Image (cartoon, coloured by chain):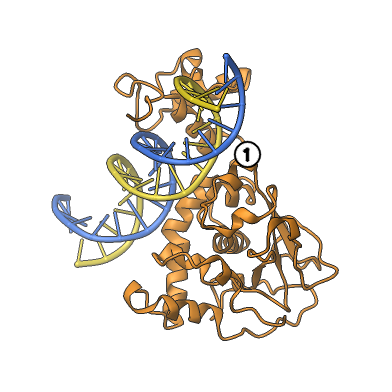
Chain colours: A orange, B blue, C yellow
Amino acid sequence: MGRAPCCDKSKVKRGPWSPEEDATLKNYLHEHGTTGNWITLPTKAGLNRCGKSCRLRWLNYLRPDIKRGTFTEEEDNVICTLFRSIGSRWSVIASQLPGRTDNDVKNYWNTKLKKKLLAVAARNNIVATRQTCDHNIADQFSAPVPPKIETPHGPETSSCLGGTLPYAANISLVHSFDQPKETFEPWCNHSDSKPMEVSDFGSTSESNSFSIPLSHQEVSSLPSSSSLAQLDQYHCSLWSGHEGINYVNSEFLMDFGFETPPADQFLLGGYGH
DNA sequence: AAACGCAGCAACCGCCTCTAT
DNA sequence: TATAGAGGCGGTTGCTGCGTT
């Protein structure tokens, strides 16, 4: 027997929100906040809606800090990078893009970015069929070794979608996933690297690392097969750099329907160490 | 002008985790 | 410790508008 639904769907309104409903919800939240209970909120606010629907409407549309409009190239880079590193964890990715919602990021990925990446794959002569080439694709994205980026200011600002080798390929997961947690040591090829916010990613800052905060829930929700589960429970740190890079290129291919590579393959294709 | 196809996006569904009891 | 309810999330659906034929 499954869970009881959160509300009687036959009695609540569904579908697109009217401006009046938006105003009602907005006004109520402005005056009372969520009071910690979305389920009872619609009744209190005088809305004939499911509480989850109210929550979604607020988070994805009515929140005052929502950023609209097209995604910038920097945002593309962040999405590509994080998708490759952590997969389709849209809420985590969105948390690194101020004003963007997980729904926005997810829609953007599904409708645009994925196609762009497929186009890149096509340009690299990657045959996007499961039958022919899991290994072929992995090869294509992990080799040959890309040229080192000479700038002392970290990676160039080229789009991850633009070149023959996506910019995001220059991102590394610094932890060795095979290491037991107790001996976990962030690996970084730059002694002067320090954490920075992903929102700074793509800047010319000398720092070329960033970290992704993970809640306990997020960590525990990782699939058991994911070596990310071995990471520190609150911070999964990533570094980008121009030397000694570990490539995780095959990871994002799972979005194209390919198997997620084994954890140890995260570190394949690196060079310089 | 109508029909059709496609892209974009808002919204829903159902599962998982957390938390209170 | 077990259980139920709520929150949160990712996957998916379906509506709408626009472009093409």
The number of numbered discs placed on residues in the rendered structure image is 1
Side (left or right) of A20 relative to B18:
left
- Asked if residue A68 can be seen in this view, the reply is no
For label 1, the SS is: loop
Q: Is residue A226 visible?
A: yes
Write down the quadrant of residue A76 in the picture. bottom right
Q: Could you say where residue A9 lies in the image, as x and y percent from the top left?
A: 33, 24
Residue at (29, 22) in percent of width and height: A10
| Disc 1 packing (10 Å; few <14; some 14–19; many ≥20) | few
Measuring from the top left, give residue A236's x and y in whole percent.
Answer: 68, 55
Circle 1 chain: A
Using the image, determine if residue A43 lies above or below residue A195. Answer: above
| Residue A33 position in % (x across, y down) | 61, 22
Question: In the image, A76: left or right of A184?
Answer: left
Give x and y (percent) for residue A26: 55, 25
A223 vs A239, nearest the viewer: A223
- The quadrant of the image that shows the N terminus of chain A is top left
* Residue A217 to residue C2: above or below: below
Residue drawn at (60%, 59%) of the image: A75
At x 53%, y 46%, the residue is: A102
Camera-side residue: A78 or A272? A272
Q: Which amino acid does label 1 sit on?
A: Asp
Q: Which image quadrant for residue A8?
A: top left
Residue A23 or C12: which is nearer the viewer?
A: C12
Residue at the right extreme, as displayed:
A192
Q: Name the residue under label 1.
A: A65
Q: Closer to the camera, A252 or A42?
A: A252
Q: Which residue is drawn at 44% across and 78% down?
A: A135
Quarter placement of the C terminus of chain A? bottom right
Can you say whether A30 is above or below A178 in the image? above
